[in-house]
Every structure is written in C-alpha cells, then in structure tokens.
Image: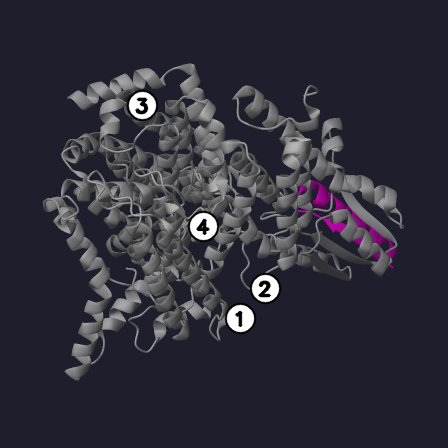
C-alpha cells in the first residue's frame, strides 16, 4: 500500500512528510509525495521549488522508503487534485499538515485541509508543525 | 533663486495631511500595480482618471505622479524576483537582477535598485526644477508654427524611433489621429467622422480611449493567452547592501541618472534606450566584467537609476510644453485637459501652485517609496499570489466603472469594448500603443496649432515653417524619416564597391540587440553585445 | 535603434525578419491575418475620405484651412500606410505580439475565454442602468472571473459584491462620480 502526502514548502508540509516516512517505515509501505501548484496564479507560495523537490527525493532515498515525488501543475483547487489522486492511487492513508486558522480566515478562504478531512475516501492523518 | 522659493512654497502646499495622504496613496497604489502582472502605471492612471474628477486637480496630479514613480519601483521588484519585466523599461534590470537573485543576492539586487531609484529620482526631480523653468521661458516665445512642428516631432518620434517597426508605429499613430478627428470640429462646429451617431458628436473621450486600449485591451489580450503555470519566485528577505555593494553601486547610479534624465526629456526618448546604454556602459567600465551575465550589481544599479531619472525627465516636456513622451504622461495630460487646464508653457504661469506642489510632492513621494520598498519588499512580492481570474476581472470591473462614470452613458461601455478589441488587435499584430494614445491626445491640438499657423499666414503653406525652432524640428523629422533610405544607399554603395557588406549588418545587429533584450527575456548578455 | 524594421527597406528580409518570426513559431509561414489589419486601415482611411467629401467648405479669413484638409490628409496617409503595410507583410514582415508577465504566446489564442468575457462585458453595459452598478458590477466581476477560469463561484460573487459596494459608496457617494443606483435606489 501507499502513503500519500500532500506536500507544501512550509513547516506543516515538512511535518506531514516526516510523519508519512515514519508511517511507511513502520508498515513497509511506499510514499507518494504530491506537490500541487495552482495554475491560476502568477506565483503560488505552495509550489515547491525544483531544488526543494530534489531535496525531498534525496531525503526519501536516504530513508530507504520506496517513493515517488510528483508535481501537479494544473487546476485551481489543491483539494480537488488530491482527492482525484486518492481515487486513482487508492492509498492506505493520506497525510497532511494543518495549521491554526482564525475564524475569519476560515470564512473567507475555505480550508483545503477541511475539505480533505471531510471528503477523502481514505483515512487522513493530520499533523501539526512543532 | 526664484525656483527655490517656488519649490519651498510647493513644499508648503504639499505638507498638508490630506496631500500627504494622497501622495502616500499614490505611491502605494503605484508600487502595487508595478508589482502586479498585467497592470502598469499608465493603465492605473487611466482607470483612476474618471473617479478623480471629484478631487482638486492638484491632488489628482499628486496621486498620479505617485503612481507614476511608484510603478517604476514595483516593476523592478518583479523583474528581479521573477525575471518577468512588466514593462520595457525594466527589461534590462531583469538581465542581471534576476541572475543576482538566483545566486542568492536578491536582497542586494532589490536594495541597489530601490536606493538607486531613490537617488536617481531625487536628482532627476532636482534637474527638473532647474531645467523646466528655462524650457518654459524659452517655450513661451514659441508661436503656433513652432508648436505644430514640435508636435510633429513627437508624432514621428513616438512612431518611428521607439518600437521595432516604423510602418506599424505609423499605422498606430494614424489610427489614433483618426480617433482624434471624431466629433465636432472646434473651429467651425462641423461634425466629422460621426456618421450620424449623436453620442459621437462630442468626440470619444480620451479617458474611454485610454481605458479601452490600456485596460480592456490588455485584459482581453492576457485572457486569450493566459499562462497556465505558476512561475517560480525567489524568496527574499528584507533588502540590504554591504559596504562592497555600496562601493560598486554609487557610480552606476550617477551615470545611470546622467543617461536617463536627458533621454526622458527628449520628445522621443523613453526609458528603453538610456537603460540599455547604462547597461552597456557599466559592462564596459566594470572592474569585473566577467560577472556580467552572472549577476553583476552594477548591471542593476545603473539601469534602474536610468529608468527613474528618465521618469523625472519625462515631466520636463510634459509640464513645460504639454508634450507627452510616454503613456503615463500622455494620460496625465489628458487629466489636465479634463480639469479644464491647458497644458503648455502657460501652465506654469497660470497654475504655479499646482506645478510646484506637484514637483514638491515628487520629492516626498520618492522618499515614501524608499521607505515603502526597502523594508516591505517581501510583502509586495505576496501580491503576485492574487489569482489571475480575480486580477483581470478586477481590471475589467474598474475599466467599466471608469468609462461609464465619464459621461454616465452606457454607449461608452459599448465603445469601450470596441476600443478594447482594438487594443487586443494592436497587441496581436505588434503595433505599439504609445503612438496611438499620443495621436488621440495631441492630434486635435496639433490640428489647432497648424490651422492657427496658416491663419497667421493667410493660408500660405509657408506659414507652417516659422522660425528656427520649426526648421530644426523639420530637419529632425527629415533625418528620422530618411534614415533607412540612407542605410539603403550605404548598402547599395558598399555592394557596388564590392566590399564586404558589413555596414547594414552591423546596423541591423544593433537594432536586433535592443529588440532582443526586449523580446527575449532570457537574452544572454552576449546577444545584446553591441556598440551603440 | 529602430531599424530592426522588417519594413520597406530590407531587400532580402534577412536576419531582421527572422528574429521576429523566430519567436512566434506558429506564424512562421507569414502571418496572413495581418492583411486583415491592412484592410482595416484602408477602411478607416476610406471612411475619413468619404466623410470629408460631406463636410462643406467652411473656410473663412479666420480659418483659411477649414475642417476638411486634416481628415483628407489622414485618409490618404492611412491608405498609403495600408499599402506599405501589405507590402511589408508580403515580404514576410511580422509584428512581434506583445509579451507580458502573464502571457504565454506559445499557446494558441483562447477564443472561448475572450467571447465569454465580451459577453459579460456587454451584459454589464445593458444592465448598468436598469439594475444599477452594484448589481451589474457584481455580475461583471463574478462573470469575468468565471470566464477566466475561477471555479469558486460563491467567492467570486462575494468579492464582486464587496468591490461593487465599496466602489459605489467610495466613488458615487463619496466623490460624486456618476454611478447609477438602479433598482436599489433608496436602499443603498
């Protein structure tokens, strides 16, 4: 089985990756890292730079876990893309990083994490950055 | 030291809370639109023009000048961090600036660009204070024939000197002039080019033209070619420079200023040529020329200073003669006309408070910009994350609002769409926008001056060739227009003499170099290697 | 500096033209649509000349020129430019389409987006007086955002309404700019 990680270049994203690696090691599973980059912005802060993806690949190789790092560059909603990936890849578990959000922030922007928690058809592990 | 006294008075007027607030608003909006993709200062001033009719003319101009200067700062931020220069003036900055950022020196690139812009802007504005009154006192003695000739120089300059293709420049100019003809003739009251449409009798408002061409045209053009991929932005902390960077920057700043100001002040100067010249000079003078192409700080400092100094230079012909040399200045002139003020040498005599307050506000705005941009650069970069649909929907929204507000008639909105499609066509076919907008704004004035000259001479065409100023103007026009013929002759001659046909090639190479820098952002410095 | 021109004086249309065509690969075979532009220029020139024939001779000692010569000159110049332009196109001249931060010229034009945008734009022009700026502006914003690929419809409407209300209060009521209240007259 596979562990799917929604990765973003933030402490939350790193925390999610760490948790996923630990989970995969414990159960002898593989890791699929997905970085979603929205195509409707000139600049997307959640897009992992190339160098970052390379570093991820190295880290995963060092940990000895079978893995794949994938970038999705189309679509405007990360939640949609990850939900699609769950349908096609059928992972055992999805790992995401979450952070505190103010009530107003939630109201205005809607949360990717919330949609994933509610709509994912597989178990979701939500971790926080320390 | 009359000027100094006037300037001090200007400071006295600008230092009211309201005016300072407006200046701050202007530079903030300016920086924001400079950073944002797809929006530039010209478009913003056009969009805001109608809503500022409720302000005092002085305040509106302070706002616009702030946007004008601010756009220059914001534009360099994006070209350094993203290598996507929003306007032709920051193309050269991107060459070295983006390389610096990639090498981890984004903070220094942003710092030298912001501080250099500040220094160049301040010196440029000082030069404006010194030069403009001289130009005005010279210009008041000019008669209608001279004015007519100067405007022709502006037309020819905008269409033949700037841009890459003369024929396309002239096509754009003629479209603009034709739009300017529409409406009631000011002298005889006859309707022209209205074809019976009542709403056209007053002519097409310059605001509608500007908003249509700049805002709607741009939004449609981008919409049809939307880049469907996020760019990689280089993360940046607060800009700063070390001692070594200062040492390497200050001379390029001053040299860049020396290039930028005079070019900006010329009727067909613009910022492209001086930024390019500054880049070439710095490369030649650099102690470590091998760094060029890999992020040399001199290659950012010089062009950025040239860019801002030329912005200050632009204001000389705009305020002293009523001649626009770039798009933003053209729309600011339209704003003056909208307030019922007549641009030209008499402006300073009739509206000294307005002119000097505006100039004083430039000093203040420039200082605000330094403060806004140095510590806040990372915050500005965040603006790049606005989703494109909202950004361009916002442009169309404000464009519609502004165009409707001018005359409160829905007809203008249909016109706006038509002009937007024209703007789309211009971009599609590579026709420059500037000649068109200058044609619309200056066309009717030029006709008026031309007819006035002939009135003085009783219809004799000789009346158009007034004094020495007019002769010089016509000589310039002749040189510009005949230049390609001269090259052709040179080529024919060298072909006949059997020598290697290198003359025209060298010339073509030079032009290609400039165009290449503008056209291909990743242009390696070698492709821009030319001796101007 | 300007003589990268693929215009009238380049006998072979050599390097100069190539540098322009290189960057627009899909038009490398010569951009025929440019003839349409030439036709447009000629049409504009013709319109000017036609209109000029209608203008009466209104010269006087005050104005020996009258309103006619300028349109005539412009009309002739436009016709001339149209011809020269066509010659340039026939020789392979191509205008470099404008680039920008958000522009991707490698993809073909997206006519569907363009048509949708124009539609919402016209809708605003029709609705602005009966329904008022707040409603028509909201529709314009949300519609344009949709046309440009926004799929968060509620968010688009909320942003649009917020912008429309803000501009209405700030500009129409604050600065006295002409924006119609429409059916919301008295409520706003």
Whether the residues at callouts 2 and 1 have beta carbons within 8 Å, the answer is: yes
Q: Earlier in the sequence, mark 3 or mark 4?
A: 4
Q: Quadrant of residue B315?
A: top left
Circle 1 packing at 10 Å, graded few (<14), some (14-19), many (20+), is some
Q: Marks 2 and 4: in contact by CB < 8 Å?
A: no
Which of the marked residues, 2 or 1, is nearer the chain's N terminus?
A: 1
Query: Horizontally, is C63 left or right of B381 in the view?
Result: left
Residue B428 vs residue B470: left or right?
right
Chain letter of disc 1 in the image: C
Q: Secondary structure at mark 2?
A: loop
Same-chain check, marks 1 and 3 = no
Choose between B324 and B291: the one closer to the eye.
B324
Mark 3 → mark 2, Cα distance in angstroms:
49 Å
**Is residue C97 a member of the stretch shown in magenta?**
no
The residue that label 1 is drawn on is C26
Residue placed under numbered mark 3 in the picture: B354
Q: Which residue is mark 4?
A: B85
What is the chain identity of the residue bearing mark 4? B
Q: Which mark is residue C108?
A: 2
């Amino acid at each position: 089985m596979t562990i799917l990680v929604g990765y973003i270049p933030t402490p939350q994203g790193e925390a999610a990756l760490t948790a996923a690696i630990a989970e995969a090691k414990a159960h002898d599973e593989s890791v699929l890292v997905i970085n979603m980059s929205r195509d409707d912005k000139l600049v997307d802060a959640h897009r992992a730079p190339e160098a970052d993806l390379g570093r991820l690949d190295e880290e995963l190789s060092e940990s000895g876990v079978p893995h794949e790092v994938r970038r999705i560059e189309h679509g405007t909603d990360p939640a949609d893309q990850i939900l699609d990936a769950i349908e096609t890849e059928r992972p055992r578990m999805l790992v995401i990083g979450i952070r505190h959000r103010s009530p107003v922030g939630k109201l205005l922007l809607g949360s990717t994490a919330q949609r994933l928690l509610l709509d994912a058809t597989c178990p979701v592990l939500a971790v926080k950055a320390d | 030291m009359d000027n100094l006294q006037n300037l001090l008075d200007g400071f006295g007027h600008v230092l009211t809370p309201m005016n300072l607030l407006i200046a701050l608003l202007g530079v903030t909006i300016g920086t924001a639109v400079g950073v944002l993709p797809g929006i530039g200062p010209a478009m913003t001033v056009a969009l805001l023009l109608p809503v500022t009719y409720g302000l005092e003319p002085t305040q509106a101009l302070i706002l616009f000048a702030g946007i004008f200067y601010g756009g220059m700062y914001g534009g360099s931020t994006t070209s350094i961090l993203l290598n996507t220069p929003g306007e032709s003036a920051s193309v050269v900055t991107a060459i070295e600036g983006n390389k610096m950022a990639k090498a981890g020196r984004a903070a220094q690139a942003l710092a030298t660009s912001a501080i250099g812009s500040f220094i160049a802007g301040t010196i440029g504005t000082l030069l404006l204070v010194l030069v403009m009154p001289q130009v005005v006192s010279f210009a008041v003695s000019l008669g209608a024939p001279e004015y007519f000739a100067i405007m022709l120089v502006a037309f020819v300059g905008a269409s033949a000197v700037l841009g890459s293709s003369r024929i396309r420049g002239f096509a754009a100019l003629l479209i603009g002039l034709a739009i300017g003809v529409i409406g009631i003739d000011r002298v005889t009251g006859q309707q022209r080019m209205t074809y019976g449409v009542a709403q056209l009798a007053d002519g097409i408002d310059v605001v509608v033209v500007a908003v249509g061409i700049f805002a709607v045209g741009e939004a449609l053009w981008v919409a049809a070619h939307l880049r469907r991929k996020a760019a990689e932005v280089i993360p940046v902390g607060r800009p700063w420079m070390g001692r070594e960077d200062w040492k390497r920057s200050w001379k390029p700043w001053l040299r860049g200023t020396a290039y930028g100001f005079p070019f900006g002040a010329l009727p067909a100067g613009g910022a492209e040529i001086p930024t390019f010249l500054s880049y070439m000079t710095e490369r030649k003078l650099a102690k470590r020329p091998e760094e060029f192409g890999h992020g040399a700080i001199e290659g950012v400092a010089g062009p950025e200073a040239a860019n801002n100094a030329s912005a200050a230079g632009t204001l000389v012909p705009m305020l002293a003669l009523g001649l626009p040399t770039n798009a933003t200045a053209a729309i600011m002139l339209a704003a003056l006309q909208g307030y019922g003020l007549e641009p030209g040498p008499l402006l300073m005599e009739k509206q000294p408070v307005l002119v000097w307050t505006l100039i004083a506000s430039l000093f203040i705005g420039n200082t605000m910009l330094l403060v806004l941009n140095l510590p806040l650069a990372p915050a500005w970069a965040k603006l790049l994350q606005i989703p494109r649909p909202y950004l361009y929907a916002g442009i169309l929204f404000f464009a519609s609002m502004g165009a409707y507000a001018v005359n409160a008639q829905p007809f203008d909105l249909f016109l706006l769409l038509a002009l937007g499609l024209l703007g789309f066509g211009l971009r599609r076919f590579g026709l420059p926008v500037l000649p068109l907008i200058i044609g619309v704004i200056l066309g009717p004035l030029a006709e008026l001056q031309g007819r006035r000259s002939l009135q003085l001479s009783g219809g004799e065409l000789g009346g158009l060739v007034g004094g020495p100023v007019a002769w010089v103007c016509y000589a310039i026009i002749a040189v510009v227009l005949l230049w390609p013929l001269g090259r052709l002759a040179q080529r024919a001659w060298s072909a006949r003499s059997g020598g290697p046909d290198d003359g025209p090639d060298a010339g073509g190479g030079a032009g290609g170099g400039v165009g290449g820098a503008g056209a291909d952002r990743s242009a390696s410095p070698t492709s821009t290697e030319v001796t101007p | 500096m300007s003589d990268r021109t693929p215009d009238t004086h380049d006998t072979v249309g050599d390097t100069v033209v190539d540098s322009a065509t290189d960057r627009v690969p899909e038009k490398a075979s010569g951009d025929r649509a440019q003839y349409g532009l030439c036709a447009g220029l000629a049409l504009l020139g013709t319109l000017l000349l036609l209109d000029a024939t209608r203008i009466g001779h209104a010269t006087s000692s005050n104005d020996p020129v009258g309103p006619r010569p300028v349109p005539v000159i412009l009309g002739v110049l436009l016709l001339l430019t149209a011809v020269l332009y066509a010659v340039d196109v026939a020789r392979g001249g191509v205008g470099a389409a404008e680039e920008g931060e958000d522009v991707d010229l490698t993809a073909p034009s997206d006519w569907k987006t363009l048509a949708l945008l124009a539609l919402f734009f016209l809708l605003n022009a029709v609705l602005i007086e009966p329904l008022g700026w707040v409603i028509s502006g909201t529709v314009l914003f949300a519609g344009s955002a949709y046309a440009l690929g926004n799929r968060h419809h509620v968010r688009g409407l909320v942003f649009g309404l917020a912008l429309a209300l803000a501009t209405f209060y700030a500009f129409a009521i604050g600065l006295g700019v002409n924006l119609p209240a429409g059916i919301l007259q008295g409520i706003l």
